[in-house]
Image (tube, helix red, strand yellow):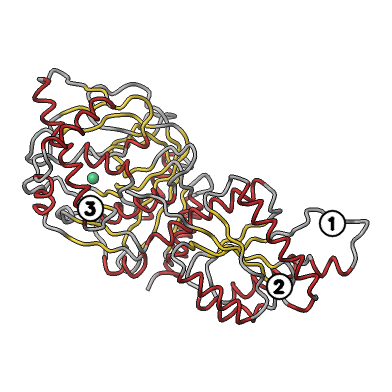
Amino acid sequence: MKLSKNYKFWFCTGSQDLYGDECLRNVAEHSRIIVEELNKSGVLPFEVVLKPTLITNELIRKTFNEANIDEDCAGVIVWCHTFSPAKSWILGLQEYRKPLLHLHTQFNEEIPYDSIDMDFMNENQSAHGDREWGHMVTRMGIERKVVVGHWTSQAVREKIASWMRTAIGIVESSHVRVMRVADNMRNVAVTEGDKVEAQLKFGWEVDAYPVNEIAEAVGAVSESDTNALVDEYYDKYEILLEGRDADEFKRHVAVQAQIEIGFERFLEEKNYQAIVTHFGDLGALKQLPGLAIQRLMEKGYGFGAEGDWKVAAMVRIMKLMSAGMKDAKGTSMLEDYTYNLVPGKEGILQAHMLEICPTIAEGPISIKCQPLSMGDREDPARLVFTSKEGPGIATSLIDLGDRFRLIINSVDCKKVEKPMPKLPVATAFWTPQPDFATGCEAWILAGGAHHTAFSYDVTAEQMGDWAAAMGIEAVYIDNNTNIRDFKKDLMLGNVVFGK
Ligand code: MN
């Protein structure tokens, strides 16, 4: 499973021919230096490519259209070194369809007090030119990110890096294809949604396959392939027999190995990057895919349980946005399961029947084999672990009937006070910001689901920007949230996005 493509970002400097050739030579040279230094910094996850200085309407339009059709280009960074009359940009911007960053910077960091003259000011007037440009982008209602500061600043470079990852989430969204080998769980509301509207808004293709087609692909996996993967599991994970017979245990684990290989082959052959299952609709599968789904999520596939295709697509997108991050801590589907309500120790225990991604694990990962109280299949093998501490975000994309809303909750992940030896599933534990009661109240008022797409690595700002690019409502629940203002956010969303 390929998580990151060799994307590039174009650097386009705005100017005009009013200031003479020498000035334009300097503009081009300064832009070249900025691009070179940004690429050398090691902060940006993708390469920046310098484009010729944009000084005419024709060149602006041509460059933006080339960016549209270049499959490797994931976005354009614009900066106006001098003044660039913004009417020159109208047609190019109207036709441009990819993520846009306005880097509001200046070549020199300090005013050259002793030597500054009018020529210098005319050459270095982004304070002026970038306002003209920003005015047009605002007037045209185009979503863009604005990053302000000197291009050598670490904070500026980190903001560009963060936006690049958001841009990947935006351009990759229309390449997400979700395979449904089970429908929504009967009578459940929050995992439902309008798949046509999802394709219009996000570009997602969400398709159904009979579960027995994938079960056939599982059945076709050879015993030798299966055994080789079982050996890999036994090398990599702790085996917790818990009184079970060792051979019988291994046979149960082998069922999951066969599912992992069969599912992956089927998904690859049919070009899907995310999958949903349902414990009540397993056809010829011998076990609910547990360990198998956990491993597929680790490889970068999106997953949603009980037919939850919205979560499957969101997990995939958040994995793409965080792909290749240094010191990444993980991204997974999670489910709000049970509470600790002891004053001062409040939190939500996150788990699922089985399917939690091991990228979020801390410490040893073990395989257990236990009965599943739901469904009517063999005891499934699963990976069991606890998760990392630290901040993260839980997101829930809901369908309100007339629109989608993305709820983004900043959460603080913690260790539970004591081990839970009888709980045979992977877990995380967090306190929602700003505090347990306010966080849960806001989540419920917003209509948030019990399944979430969670990440330690993707930020609330990135997901809010992603939602804005998709043209949908986003609400934030974090340390700035209070219920009175949050209700106003929801009311505002109804005015702006409601029909
Ligand atoms: Mn569930």
* Mark 1: few/some/many CA within 10 Å (<14, 14-19, 20+): few
Q: Give the camera-side residue of 344 and 40.
A: 40
Mark 3 — residue?
267
| Image quadrant, ligand 1 | top left
Q: Earlier in the sequence, mark 1 or mark 2?
A: 2
- Whole-number angstrom distance, CA of label 2 to CA of label 3: 48 Å
- Determine the secondary structure under disc 1: loop
**Which is nearer the N-term, disc 3 or disc 1?**
1
Q: Residue at x 14, y 41 (%)?
A: 288
Give the residue type that dot 2 points to. Answer: Ser
Q: Position of residue 230 (x, y in %)?
A: 19, 31
User: Which of the 4 image quadrants contains residue 92?
Assistant: bottom right
| Residue shown at 46% from the left, 47% from the top | 458
Distance from label 1 to label 2 (Cα)?
Answer: 20 Å
Q: Residue at x 37, y 74 (%)?
A: 499
Q: In terms of sequence position, does the residue under pointer 2 or pointer 3 come before the other? A: 2
SS for dot 2:
loop
Residue that numbered label 2 is attached to: 15
Residue 332 horizontal side relative to residue 480, left or right: left
